[in-house]
């Protein structure tokens, strides 16, 4: 699938979305500490082909930054767009919340860029960066002898909550 407005189609061909209609999801992304960060959210509508079929909100650090956002109405289908904000963070975690009123919220990639404390205007919409996927050479290794099975460990206690991270490659400008 070719994605308009980018030469980095691979970034936009997949997405994170909620599991159900009207659902939500969140990220708690650890950062170096309190300070000012540029948050760049990458989007492309790769499923719907009419406006009004996906409407969602995005909140960063508890503040709604996209309200009733209709991605298709903004840029159409199969077109990349980046929305960015400069956000002060008081702790060592950036909180992102996505919730839908129609269908499911989605995001293709997230960039977190630490900044010096400066008054950069916010919000802004920019053209997606250029990305060249890395070259991958598959390698297969076969065992030279039959492995000895070992006992499967039994988990104990309560598992720690998962922290999700997705980042688009940072491109120098």
Image: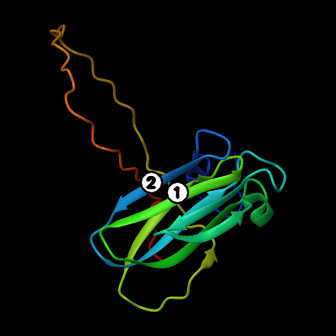
Q: Residue at x 44, y 50 (%)?
A: 134
- 157, above or below 172, in the image: above
Query: Residue under circle 1?
Result: 109
Q: Is residue 47 left or right of residue 143?
A: right
- In the image, farthest residue toward the right: 50
Where residue 69 appears, as percent x and y from the top left, is: 70, 63
Q: Residue at x 35, y 86 (%)?
A: 116
Determine which quarter of the picture holds residue 8. Answer: bottom right
- 87, above or below 130, in the image: below
Q: Residue at x 31, y 66 (%)?
A: 31
Q: How far apart are labels 1 and 2 at the CA level?
A: 6 Å
**Observer-nearest residue: 23 or 71?**
23
- In the image, farthest residue toward the bottom: 119
**Observer-nearest residue: 160 or 111?**
160
Total marks shown come to 2
Where residue 53 appears, as percent x and y from the top left, is: 79, 50
Q: Does label 1 or label 2 sit earlier along the sequence?
A: 1
Query: Residue under circle 2?
Result: 166
Secondary structure of the residue carrying tag 1 is strand
Where residue 145 appears, as percent x and y from the top left, is: 17, 9
Secondary structure of the residue carrying tag 2 is loop
Tell me whether circle 1 and circle 2 mark residues in contact (CB < 8 Å): yes
**Observer-nearest residue: 130 or 163?**
163
Residue 5 — which label? none
């Amino acid at each position: 699938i070719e994605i308009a407005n980018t030469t980095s189609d691979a970034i936009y061909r997949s997405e994170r979305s909620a599991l159900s209609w009207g659902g939500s999801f969140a990220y708690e992304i650890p950062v170096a500490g309190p300070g000012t960060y540029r948050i760049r959210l990458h989007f492309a509508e790769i499923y719907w082909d009419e406006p009004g079929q996906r409407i969602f909100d995005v909140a960063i650090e508890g503040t709604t930054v996209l309200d009733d956002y209709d991605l298709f109405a903004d840029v159409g289908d199969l077109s990349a767009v980046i929305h960015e904000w400069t956000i002060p963070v008081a702790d060592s975690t950036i909180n992102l919340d996505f919730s839908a009123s129609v269908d499911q919220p989605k995001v293709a990639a997230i960039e977190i860029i630490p900044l010096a404390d400066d008054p950069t205007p916010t919000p802004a919409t920019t053209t997606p960066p250029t990305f060249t996927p890395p070259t991958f050479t598959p390698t297969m290794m076969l065992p030279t002898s039959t492995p000895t099975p070992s006992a499967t460990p039994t988990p104990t206690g309560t598992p720690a909550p998962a922290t999700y991270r997705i980042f688009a490659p940072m491109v120098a400008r």
